[in-house]
Image: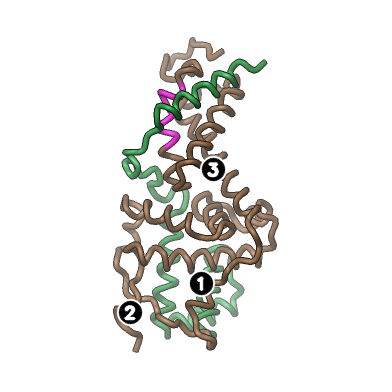
Amino acid sequence: MSGPGGADGPARALPPPGAWVDLYGDVLFRYALARVADEDAARDLVQDTLVAAVRARGSFGGRSSPRTWLVGILKHKIADLFRRRAREAPLDEADPEQDLFDPGGRWRTPPGRWRTDPSELASRRQFWQVLVKCLSALPARKAGAFALRELEGYDTARLCQELGVTPTNAWVLLHRARLGLRRCLEAGGFGNPAQEEADP
Amino acid sequence: MITCREATRRASRALDAPLPLGECLALGLHLAACRGCARYAGWIRALHRALAPGAARREHPGALAGATLSDTDRARLRARVLEAASEP
């Protein structure tokens, strides 16, 4: 199956499938959990990944480590999940603009000053935990659109294709996701705390 | 002058697609005059950059270091993997 013979030796050979769960199960589980914030969904992703990997094990070429190869499969499964969630969610979702702006289009409470240096956000461990929680609290279509766009790097064209929406709809979803996320991240201690100072 | 509601829409869209010149200019004027929207625009741009694939460390090791599969999960997963491995 995973013939040896490579100069790289055992590191590049695929261990027998029976050992995968012990070798890579937790790595895959944490990777998935960091993105979906839902243990049941993370477990399902690990299972889907391992089953897909077993079926595709003949195509493991040893160009990357087994771990990298499995994480690559998991990434596809995660993107699939976001896509499915976004597609299956109801269309009529709440519009956060109603809460955030008055009828004249002005902020009800303008964003305040920065609490965290934005360039440091990504390296802050707590930030990721709060982000994943906030994402899972968003309605599914917005969360899915945001995750595909910002975490997976889809451009508008690909996003529209995956979600079956027009560019305008995609931008509205992303805009509402950002409005909702700012409010949630702010409550979690990141972002600009409102009410700290009013605009002149 | 566009409203704050419209300015935040445009600031968001500018992260996803090029903004038509006229819309872009009106947005710039608004942001120059409105501190709240300038902060919002800066915040979503920072988030966009922080999350961009490859631009940042997204593995964040240790963030969930305590999370492990239970023994029950392992047994179930192993059984499922072996079942798949025995498929023709």
> In this structure image, what is the colour of chain A?
brown
The stretch in magenta equals A20-29
How crowded pointer 3 is (Cα within 10 Å; few <14, some 14-19, many 20+) is rated as many
Chain of the residue that carries numbered disc 2 in the rendered image: A
Please tell me whether mark 1 sits on a helix, a strand or a loop.
helix
Does residue A65 show up?
no
The quadrant of the picture occupied by the C terminus of chain A is bottom left
Name the quadrant of the N terminus of chain A.
top right
Q: In the rendered structure, does residue A124 fall within the stretch colored magenta?
A: no
Provide the residue designation for mark 3.
A78
* Magenta stretch holds residue A28: yes
Mark 1 and mark 3 residues within 8 Å of each other at the beta carbon:
no
Q: According to the image, label 1 marks what residue?
A: B11
Say which of A174 and A46 sits in front: A46
Disc 1 sits on a residue from what chain?
B
**Which residue is label 2 attached to?**
A195
Instruction: Determine whether the residue tagged by mark 2 lies in a helix, strand or loop.
Output: loop
Write the residue at 40% across / 31% down: B70
Say which chain is green. B
Q: Residues within 10 Å of mark 2 (few under 14, many from 20)?
A: few
Q: Amino acid at mark 1?
A: Ala
Is disc 1 surrounded by few (<14), some (14 to 19) or many (20+) residues within 10 Å? many
Respond whether the residues carrying marks 1 and 3 are from the same subunit: no
Front position among marks 1 and 2? 2
As displayed, is residue A61 above or below residue A107?
above
Q: Residue at x 47, y 58 (%)?
A: A137
The spot of residue A96 in percent (x, y) is: 52, 72
Chain at numbered mark 3: A
